[in-house]
Structure formats: structure tokens, C-alpha cells
Amino acid sequence: MFTMRHLLLIALVLGANLFTATLRAAAASFDCGKANGTVENLICKNTRTSVLDDKLQQTYAAALVATSPSGKKALVEEQRHWITYTRNTCQDEACLQQVYMARIAVLARNEKYIIDDSSCEPPTDGGECINVVTYRDPSIRIISFNKSLVEQKQSGKIISCSRLINLPMGTANSNNSYGGICILQDGTQRKAVEICNDDMFGHFQMRPATPKDASGKDLIDFTHSYCFGG
């Protein structure tokens, strides 16, 4: 037979569970009662991730207000790519929290113009510097990389990229050579790769990436060696 103390404890436990569920459902930027797919369910079941999702939505809305009219379309596409190729490729809460915090930091800059970085980098073997464009949105070349994989009869599919560069020749209508640090999924296996291709001559190369390869310098050298020029 339940005593008053037992009933009170049960009520407190049920109340705490209900409060936690309500907090998680309310914190996300979407209705957790209608969560769809693995990623949305991961977001909803973890309070911290759910709060980050809500914070990102607020930060994104502020970034849209801050950017110029011409930048709004680019920012909307960039955010769509981030959801598809970065957020939705996560398989656990740790990954989600990492990519959310990184994306919030980018959006929080509230930049008026959505532009890519350009620089001139000296090659390893000396000589004139190489024009390098580093893209804000590293996902824009994924479709092209996957097309090259099919043409080269390579197995697997690029599902995400964390860095993307272009080594333009420097004249109008000339060749562009792209290199990326990306994730290749082959069956159930995923691995980090360096991959490059170009627009005009069919250059292509891919190799396993190491932590060292994440540096901008290594990716420039890789792309310049295998996919640059005619």
C-alpha cells in the first residue's frame, strides 16, 4: 500500500520527467512532437543540442536581417547546404553540438556581404604565388565531385566537405581547379579524403586525408599538383 510519502515521490518523479520533456520540446526550433529522422530525434532527445538548435535559428534570422539584399539569396542557399551536407550527416550528439557551435560562430558575425576569401599563396617549390579562393560554403562542389567519382569509376559518394578551395587561372573563361577536404561514404564506411577536379580538362585525384591535410597549405599543394592547369 502506497503511503503519502510514496505518492509524493512518484508525483515528483513524474513532474520532473514531464518538465524535462517539455523543455526539450520547447527549446528546439521545430516541434519535437513531429521530429522526423535520426538527426531531428537526436536534437530533441538532448537538451543541450536542442538549445543549440534554437540558438542557431535565432542567429540565422539575425544574419539574414544584417546581410545585404544581394547576400540574402546566398545565405539562404548556404544554410540549406549546411543542413543537408553538414548537420544531416552527423551520427551522434557530439558531432551535432560541434557543427552547431561552429555554424553559430559564422552566422553571429552578421556580415553585410556574403563573400569568399581570396589570397595569393607561395607554392612549396617557390615561384610566383598561387591565387586561392577559399569558399564560405564548402558544399557547393559536392555534386561535381560525385560526378567525377562516377566518371572515374570510383566507388563511394562524397557526403560532406569541411573545406573547399579554387585555384583560378586568373583570366576570364579560363580553367578553375577545385580541392576539398571531404567525407567519402562507401557502403557503411566513412573516411576523410582530399579530392580535386577542374572545369575544363577532366583532372581528378583523390587520396585519404590525414590531420595534417586539414591545413590550408597542404590542400593548396595537393590541388595544384594534381588538378591545376591544362
Image: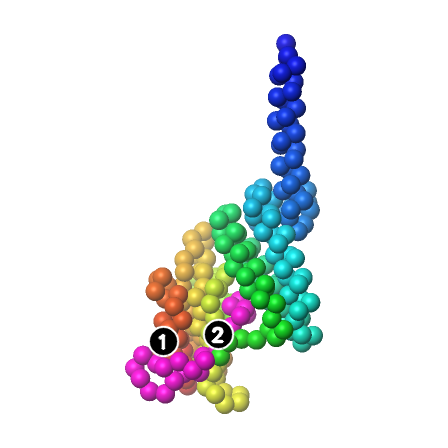
* Region in magenta: 119-140
Which one is in front in this view, the residue at disc 2 or the one at disc 1?
Answer: 2
Query: Compared to 91, does 8 lie above or below?
Result: above
| SS state under label 1 | helix
Label 2 Cα neighbours within 10 Å, binned few <14 / some 14-19 / many ≥20: many
Q: Is residue 133 magenta?
A: yes
Between 189 and 23, the one lying in front of the other is 23
Between 228 and 148, the one lying in front of the other is 228
Residue 139 position, x and y percent, is: 53, 67
Q: Residue at x 68, y 42 (%)?
A: 33
Residue 59 position, x and y percent, is: 63, 60
Q: Amino acid at mark 1?
A: Asp
Query: Compared to 193, does 31 lie above or below?
Result: above
Task: Residue at the far left: name it.
Answer: 125
* Residue 221: numbered disc: 1
The picture quadrant where one finds residue 47 is top right
Q: Which residue is mark 2?
A: 134
Q: Amino acid at mark 2?
A: Thr
Decide if residue 209 is on the left or right side of residue 115. left
Q: Earlier in the sequence, mark 2 or mark 1?
A: 2
Q: Residue at x 45, y 60 (%)?
A: 183
Principal SS element in the magenta part?
loop
The C terminus sits in image quarter:
bottom left
Work out how far the residue at label 2 is from the one at label 1, CA to CA, in angstroms.
14 Å
Q: Residue at x 69, y 46 (%)?
A: 31
Residue 145 position, x and y percent, is: 48, 69
Q: Is residue 122 magenta?
A: yes
